[in-house]
Amino acid sequence: MHLNEKKRKTLVFIRHGKSSWKYSVDDLVRPLKKRGISDIGLIANEFSKLKIKSDLVVSSPAKRALDTCNTLMKILDISDNILQVSTQLYDFEGSKTLNFIKKIDNFYQVVFLFGHNNAFTNLINHLGNLRIDNLPTSGLVVIRFDVSDWSDICNGITLSKLFPKDFK
């Protein structure tokens, strides 16, 4: 790691894959559809070309988010040792997730977050310099911040956006 890297923080927002409404189950246990699994595989393969390595992976406890997370981690050969699950990412507006981000230990430089809309679209538009209308299911956005402390993040640079429709 370069000395300058300590003055940078990077967030990778990944929205859960397409979920199934076929079963009458609680929202927290709603599963992925087959398309959700295939789309996250497509995004993981494209994302691997960016060669961004994570120090920490955090997922919402919702089954669809955690299954998306586990699928991407397996494809990218990311160790389970860096995975955490946080109820703060089971957020549909963004304030709980932003509070979580601002309290991340500064030891971590690159953090992958797996969660939900509208929270992720709101945060991407609030924190990045590229506006999006909607982060689609299995969509991924990378934002870099030129700060050394997570509590100082704002006005980041949107480095990449990967949406499944762009690779089909």
Image (cartoon, grey):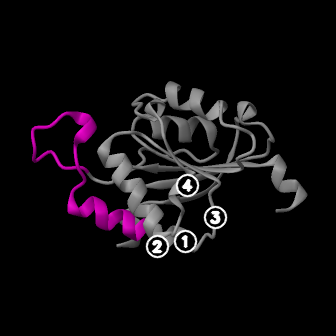
Q: Using residue 69 as the reference point, say whether residue 3 is left or right of it.
A: right
Circles 3 and 1, Cβ within 8 Å, touching? The answer is no
Q: Quadrant of residue 3?
A: bottom right
Three-letter code, disc 1: Ser
| On screen, residue 130 above or below 77 | above
* CA distance separating discs 1 and 2: 5 Å
Q: Which residue is rendered at x = 10% and y = 44% of the image?
A: 23
- Assess disc 3: are there few (<14), some (14-19) or many (≥20) residues with their C-alpha within 10 Å of its C-alpha: few
Q: Using residue 136 as the reference point, say whether residue 73 is left or right of it.
A: right
* CA distance separating discs 3 and 1: 7 Å
Residue with the mark numbered 1:
48
- Please identify the residue farthest to the front as the structure is shown: 81
- Picture coordinates of residue 22 (x, y %)? 10, 47
Residue with the mark numbered 4:
81
Q: Using residue 109 as the reference point, say whether residue 28 is left or right of it.
A: left
Whichever of labels 1 and 4 marks the residue nearer the N terminus, that label is 1
Q: Judge whether residue 10 is colored magenta.
A: no
Residue with the mark numbered 3:
52
- Picture coordinates of residue 113 (x, y %)? 52, 46
Circles 1 and 2, Cβ within 8 Å, touching? The answer is yes
- Picture coordinates of residue 35 (x, y %)? 24, 63
Three-letter code, disc 4: Asn
Which element carries disc 4, helix, strand or loop? Answer: helix
| Residue range corresponding to the magenta coloring | 19-43
Q: Nearer the viewer, residue 128 or 61?
A: 61
Residue with the mark numbered 2:
45
Q: Judge whether residue 36 is colored magenta.
A: yes
Three-letter code, disc 2: Asn
Circles 1 and 4, Cβ within 8 Å, touching? The answer is no
